[in-house]
Image (cartoon, rainbow, N blue to C red):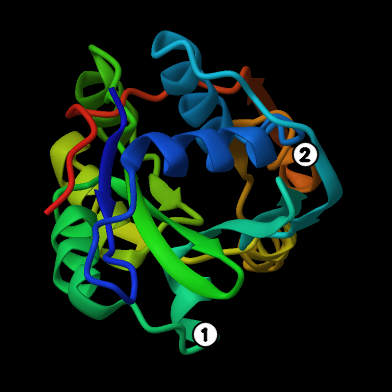
Amino acid sequence: MTHILTAKRSDGVPVSPADVLKWAASVEQRSEHPLALAILDAARAKGVTLLAVDKFAAMEGRGVRGTVDRRIVEVISLRHARERSLDLGGLTTDADRLAGEGRSPVIVVVNNTVFAIIAIADPIKPGARDAVLALQARGLEVTMVSGDSKRAAEAVAKEVGIDDVVAEVLPSQKADLVRKFQRKGRKVAMVGDGINDAPALARADVGSPSAPARMSPSKPPTSP
């Protein structure tokens, strides 16, 4: 199940994790991002009935928003929440801890107020570390390029043996990074999500699109 940590309302009552999942999944049903698919999978597993979403908008590398049940619901990255100086309250420590554990904390904002964090773990595929080591043994340089926070990306990179990490990168910036390597005379092969990484895959000398992965949240919904 998706790990949900909720904030408390102004009256001190914790926000319902079930409501958070319903609102977030309702907005994410219009998105094709792997994180959206993970939230939708969790909602379906719990039998959540999705609500209609109006005024849907995807914000490149930052998240999505839409109107659900007369509420403006946003599901955004931790980085974007901090760019907007949104008050995470007691969830700040949890967000940093989850990122340090290699999970992707996404922030659920309702009517411009932070309601919850949904933590999503992207399981490392069996053999991933061996594949990286094999490439390095052939003299190839391996770089992880991620839209996740620096702490989350570095935690995953450490597990698979990658030292060079570029984090908090927007999809359009990944193509710029490929150009940067090519200007140095390097041939670039890239593996990435065929939807969000399409510009970078097209720019690379060799592009290998992968289907969006089904990410695995690690704990059942809880509230503090």
Q: Give the residue number, with chain letter if any, for mark 2.
A: 198
Q: Upstream in the sequence, badge 2 or badge 1?
A: 1
Q: Secondary structure at mark 1?
A: helix
Is residue 55 at all visible to an observer of this figure? yes
- Depicted 208 relative to depicted 162: above or below: above
Quadrant in the rendering for residue 70: bottom right
- Disc 2 and disc 1: Cα gap in Å? 26 Å
Whether residue 110 sits left or right of residue 221 in the image: it is right
Q: Quadrant of the C terminus?
A: bottom left
Is residue 167 at all visible to an observer of this figure? no
Whether residue 86 sits left or right of residue 5 in the image: it is right
Whether residue 219 sits left or right of residue 27 in the image: it is left
Q: Give the residue number, with chain letter if any, for mark 1.
A: 83
Q: Position of residue 137 (x, y in %)?
A: 25, 31
- Depicted 196 relative to depicted 52: above or below: below
Q: Position of residue 172 (x, y in %)?
A: 75, 60
Residue visible at 14% across and 49% down?
101
Amino acid type of disc 2? Answer: Ala
Whether residue 100 sits left or right of residue 4 in the image: it is left
Which label sits in the foreground, 2 or 1?
Answer: 1
Q: Position of residue 213 (x, y in %)?
A: 50, 21
Amino acid type of disc 1? Answer: Glu
Q: Quadrant of the N terminus?
A: top left
Residue visible at 61% across and 54% down?
186
Q: Nearer the viewer, residue 10 or 220?
A: 10
